[in-house]
């Protein structure tokens, strides 16, 4: 934008100087030289305006793409919300069958999401050692060998289910 202002001022300066030089009777060679300088500055001004317009078009295009992506995400989120709730209810039922405590349920969900022991401890405002003990208890109660089997227990059937197109 600053370039645009500078080029506009330069073009105005040359145009004004040419006008006064003509009135004062300055030789044509000098006026012609300033005319060339005015033409160059005016051309640069037009070029700068074109560059700005192209950048604005590109920004507008990117904004449109961003809005489309946000809308697509919101549509996907709305479509999957009911399914996600059903899956969460099924997970909660399985946790009840395993007789997990409230804290163990929280830890199990965070393990399934892939958080580290340290991250889980920070989120739950507890010691990492406590989280490790809870994880061990979860694995014993569920008769699973670890985090991978815990996640696979819930994801395997979801991911291997046949795809039904409507």
Image: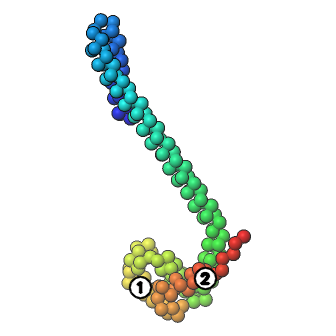
- In the picture, the disc for residue 132 is 1
Which label belongs to residue 160?
A: 2
In this picture, residue 5 sits left or right of residue 29? right
Position above or below: 82 against 1: below
Taking the image as shown, residue 118 lies to the left or right of residue 53, namely left
Occupied quadrant, residue 82: bottom right
Question: Where does the N terminus fall, quadrant-wise?
Answer: top left
| Secondary structure type for disc 1 | helix
Task: Classify 10 Å Cα crowding around label 1: few (below 14), some (14-19), many (20 and above).
Answer: some
* Proximity of marks 1 and 2: CB atoms separated by less than 8 Å: no
| Apparent side of residue 65 relative to residue 38 in the rendered image (left or right) | right
The residue shown at (46%, 41%) is 54
Which residue is found at the position 66% from the left and 80% from the top?
162
Question: Where is residue 83 drawn, in percent x and y?
Answer: 65, 72
Where in the figure is residue 16, as x and y percent of width and height?
35, 15
Q: For marks 1 and 2, give the one nearer the viewer.
A: 2
- Location of the C terminus by quadrant is bottom right
For numbered disc 2, what is the local secondary structure?
helix
- Can residue 164 be seen in this snapshot? yes
> Which sits earlier in the primary sequence, circle 1 or circle 2?
1
Vertical position of residue 2 compared to residue 158: above or below: above
Q: What is the C-alpha distance between the residues marked 1 and 2?
A: 30 Å
């Amino acid at each position: 934008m600053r370039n645009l202002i500078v080029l506009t001022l330069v073009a105005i300066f040359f145009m004004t100087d040419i006008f006064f030089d003509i009135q004062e009777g300055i030789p044509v060679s000098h006026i012609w030289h300033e005319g060339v300088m005015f033409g160059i500055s005016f051309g640069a001004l037009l070029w700068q305006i074109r560059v700005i317009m192209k950048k604005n078009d590109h920004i507008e295009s990117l904004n449109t793409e961003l809005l489309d992506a946000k809308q697509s995400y919101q549509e996907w989120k709305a479509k999957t919300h009911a399914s996600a709730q059903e899956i969460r209810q099924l997970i909660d039922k399985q946790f009840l069958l395993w007789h997990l405590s409230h804290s163990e349920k929280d830890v199990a969900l965070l393990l399934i999401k892939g958080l580290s022991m340290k991250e889980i401890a920070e989120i739950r405002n507890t010691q990492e050692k406590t989280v490790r003990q809870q994880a061990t208890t979860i694995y014993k109660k569920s008769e699973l060998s670890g985090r991978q089997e815990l996640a696979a227990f819930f994801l395997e059937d979801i991911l291997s289910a046949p795809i039904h197109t409507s």
